[in-house]
Amino acid sequence: MTTPDTQRPRSGSDILRTALRRNVGAMAGGTLLMGLYQAGETAFPIALGLIVEHTMRDRGLGALGLSIAVLAVIITTVSLSWRFGMRILQKANTTEAHRWRVQVAACGLQPVARDVDLKSGEVLTIATEDADQTADIIEVVPLLISSLVAVAVAALALGLADLRLGLLVIVGTVAILSCLSVLSKRIGTSTQEQQARVARAGAKVADLITGLRPLHGFGGNHAAFRSYRKVSTEAKVQAITVAKVNGAYAGTALALNAVLAGAVTLTAGWLAFDGRISVGELVMAVGLAQFIMEPLKLFSEMPKYVMMARASAERMALVLTAPPVMTPGSERPAENGDVELDCVHYGTLRKLKFRVSAGEFVAIAAYRPRAAADLASILAVNVPPGAYEGTVRVGGRDLADLSVEAVREHVLVNPYDGEIFAGTLRSNIDPSGTSRMVPEAVEASMLTDVVALHREGLDYAVRDRGANLSGGQRQRLSLARALAADSDVLVLHDPTTAVDAVTEQLIARNVAKLRRGRTTIVLTSSPALLDAADRVLVLDDGVVTAEDTHRALLATDEAYCLAVAR
């Protein structure tokens, strides 16, 4: 079932707060180590200044040896604190990104679909790039705090040498951040728009790949490619805009940091020339002016990454906070396995009414393919009961009163374009590894020749979307998966359109034999499947216009004969 709304984040800010709260321990450790690293980096020029100061007073070898030892300790501290600090933060970052990817994926796998106006390609981008950028907040906050530590240590050290130097660093840092905060907001807005356009382009590619063969068939591939080029060009233009804003931000940050470092150096030189600070303090000030460039650069970049993380979190919130398209009931269907539609009006269906008894094998010949698709969507609960008129009963109970999990356990609707996943033939047929019907399903779907063709048998590797299988092999593999599930009610939508006539005849007999005693509905125009059914319902103009066996309809119904005879 869906997670209660009170337990889900409600906005992008909630997502960021959740990410921070879950990683408090790792962030505390990472902040401590990275603060130690920045303090060590800043301590290096301070130590150099002190070494120069004391060496000029005491020119002995002991003072030189102590200075070298102090520098060695600082260098070791800097190296180890960076190594282990970044290890902690990057582990937490990667783990948090994984959690959000799983959560976004879980939303797509819920039995009840969510009301999200996003295509699968867009959701994929959200589950990958946006999840990664959102999790970056785990590193951003500790780095922001640690760079602030470096700036504070530098300001304190310079302030002890001369108050004006310390104030210059503090005022300069505040001025830099004020200027960059304006640009960071622009980056956040531009990045969010770019991610949306890239996601739309990804969704368009997924659609084209899925429909490439039929597009070639009726010559629509050129128009489809032009459509993709338009979407891709929009994404490119927005990416260039984001790159320009990022470039302006980086250039401005670098220029302002350089101005501040130059101002500190010149001020220290003037104070030394005027005799207000010593030579050692001058060396410290010049060294800090150079070393402070790194934490200042890091400090000034953090607002940009915060805005990018927030933009990605807002996009994830589109999926995670989307309400379910329906509120399912809690009952379970009875075990008898009958299916009844009572005056269902939806799409091309017009007051559709029929009943399939438990254990019956019924074929439905829809003269309009859209009607078969609408009927399959209703039985698969892809359409919420509130979106159509009439009543659908499964096991004698209203579909609206049943839990979706119970319906999915009881009724399996196998679409005509069933997905094939990367893995093996076996993992595609039995994804859970619990079915006892795999051998029977392979034989009934006539997948035996595919298994026999490869030395690995059922362990033969299948590429994503079944790229190394023919259309007929993919369709038979999808059918084998549906049969191996051995559900109480099985609905097959055009399961044999890509196989030859001889194989189709064998599949029809095998399916009827294997499913004997189990409720089976086949939406098809295949003569072989129609002939194997106990009875055929003719679906024309959204209603059942005829009902009989296939051979009786061939003999008495001319329209039926023209529609299904090959």
Image: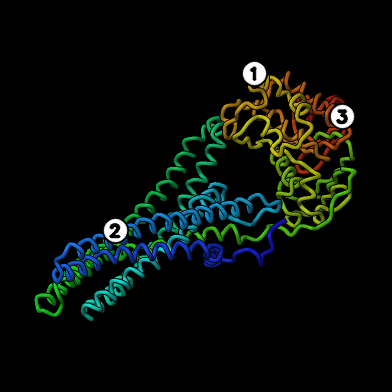
Check disc 1 and report the residue beneath it: 453
- In this view of the protein, can residue 409 be seen by the observer? yes
What colouring method underlies this structural image? rainbow
Q: Earlier in the sequence, mark 3 or mark 1?
A: 1
Helix, strand, or loop for circle 1?
helix
CA neighbours of label 2 inside 10 A, class few (<14), some (14 to 19), many (20+): few
Check disc 3 and report the residue beneath it: 549
Q: Looking at the image, is 187 positioned above or below residue 366?
A: below
> What's the residue type where badge 2 is placed?
Ala
Tell me which corner region of the image, top left, top right, bottom left or bottom right, holds residue 295.
Answer: bottom left
> What's the residue type where badge 3 is placed?
Thr
Instruction: Give the mark toward the camera: 3 or 1.
Output: 1
In three-dimensional space, the C-alpha distance between marks 2 and 1, rounded to whole angstroms, equals 67 Å
Check disc 2 and report the residue beneath it: 72
Front-most of 122 and 37? 37
Residue positioned most to the left: 273
Helix, strand, or loop for circle 2?
helix
CA neighbours of label 1 inside 10 A, class few (<14), some (14 to 19), many (20+): few
Q: Split into 4 quadrants, where in the image is the C terminus?
A: top right
> What's the residue type where badge 1 is placed?
Leu
Q: Looking at the image, is 160 positioned above or below residue 322?
A: below
Q: Split into 4 quadrants, where in the image is the N terminus?
A: bottom right
Q: Earlier in the sequence, mark 3 or mark 2?
A: 2
Image spot of residue 474 (x, y percent):
64, 29
Image spot of residue 538 (x, y percent):
81, 36
Q: Are marks 3 and 2 in contact (CB under 8 Å)?
A: no
On screen, residue 25 versus residue 396, left or right, reads: left
> Which residue is at 70% across, 57% downward?
2
Helix, strand, or loop for circle 3?
loop
